[in-house]
Amino acid sequence: MSNFKTFVRSGHWPTLLASFLYFDFCFAIWVLNGAMAPFISETFHLSAAQKGFMISVPILAGALMRFPLGVLSQYIGRKNAAMVEMGLIVIALAFGFLFVNSYDGVLAMGVLLGIAGASFGVALSLGSGWFPPKYKGLAMGIAGAGNSGTVLAVLFAPPLAMKFGWQAVYGLAAFTMLLPMAVMWFAAKEPPDREHQSFREHIACLFEKDGWAFSLIYIITFGGFIGLASFLPTYFYDQFKVTKVEAGQLTMLATLMGSAVRVVGGYISDRIGGINTLSGVLLLVAGSLVMCGFASSSVALTTLLFMLCFAALGAGNGALFQLVPLRWPLTTAVAGSMIGEIGALGGGFLPNAMGQSKQIAGTYLWGFVSFAVLSLVMLAMLRLVQIRWTRTWAEKGGRARPGAAPASSSSGYAKPELSA
């Protein structure tokens, strides 16, 4: 408890709270179509492939919007960028309530929901910006736990859609955005780590191997999280013939684990290192996904396995973003947005893989297996690149170097202090 009090006093907790709420509500909006997919699919009589594509559209759109928002935040400030984004989300939801009444309209709405998916890098950088390097993993874990917005979506959207119709949920969701907007406006303060750099310096991480290594790993940890979270209501509904509301409740059990353990992942990574944590995570993700594919006859066992898988994915998200501010201390927001963009693009792979597997092979098994194989490939890559990482900017295992200070170079490396 004393350590946590020290952590709270080391930064600005109202900004961290505002960042959490901002990310939490944006995440809930981002996955709305996934949460309501059984209703939408029934309305328009969609095939398995169409379901997968519909669910993937907001994920892909959100991924593509992340980097531009991250760049914008460097010029107008993260707090201002967050307020602009939330205002656009309200407008987008109003469009969904008033005009979406066809499958093509749902796809267009999926693109607009992607606005909410752009919040990731800004939320984490804003929330952790007031905290020193040794606590950034925990701060980012708390802000990143806003992916618990998935829980809000799958828990509340199905019963509301059952009572009022799924189009009305868009309108109701617009009003919920007023809460994070108010908290952000009155409680948040722009962190002091904002740097005035050239556009080339902002995007330097795009031209470095480390940026792409981080992004590929994030395809598994976050791409797997958002892809599975969006697809699970459809999976439970189709595979086990539960009701639409029950499908949302079962999804909630799994995604809640991922959101809660993200904080733990950041906390553990501060102590044993993000590299060590990610190594265990990738093994656990691969194993649990394969077991999910073979446990398709038992809803109870499948739910427990998904809870284990989401716990690993959540810990992996926290672990990876414990490493980001160590590698890019001066451009954390933009680096995080770029990594989040590629990672979320990977999230679009999983719903499509699941839909194609079902439509072509008559089973979802091969969708699970394909992502498990990808996890093992990323593990092999991590074990190779970590050798260089621990020689340049991180301690063994991926911990922060004692006394590290920001570099003045555009690469964003932290310069270790030289001991006598």
Image (cartoon, rainbow, N blue to C red):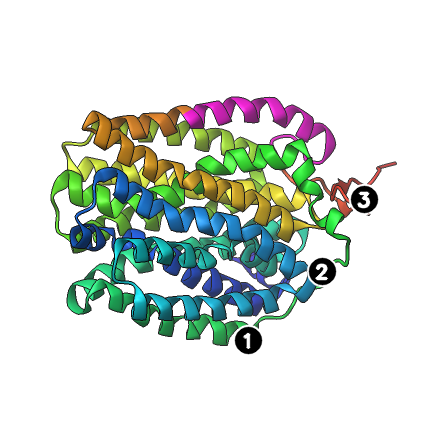
Give how far across and how far down residue 354 sits, in percent: 29, 34
- Specify the farthest residue to the right: 420
- Numbered mark located on residue 409 in the image: 3
**Magenta region, main secondary structure:** helix
The disc labelled 3 sits on which kind of residue?
Ser
In this image, 91 relative to 333: left or right? left
Q: Secondary structure at mark 3?
A: loop
Q: Is residue 286 above or below residue 85?
A: above
The disc labelled 1 sits on which kind of residue?
Trp
Q: Are marks 3 and 2 in contact (CB under 8 Å)?
A: no
The disc labelled 2 sits on which kind of residue?
Arg
Give how far across and how far down residue 417 sits, in percent: 81, 41
- Numbered mark located on residue 194 in the image: 2
Q: Which residues are magenta?
A: 374-397
Instruction: Give the CA distance from mark 1 to mark 3.
Output: 33 Å
Residue appearing at x 30%, y 41% in the figure: 52
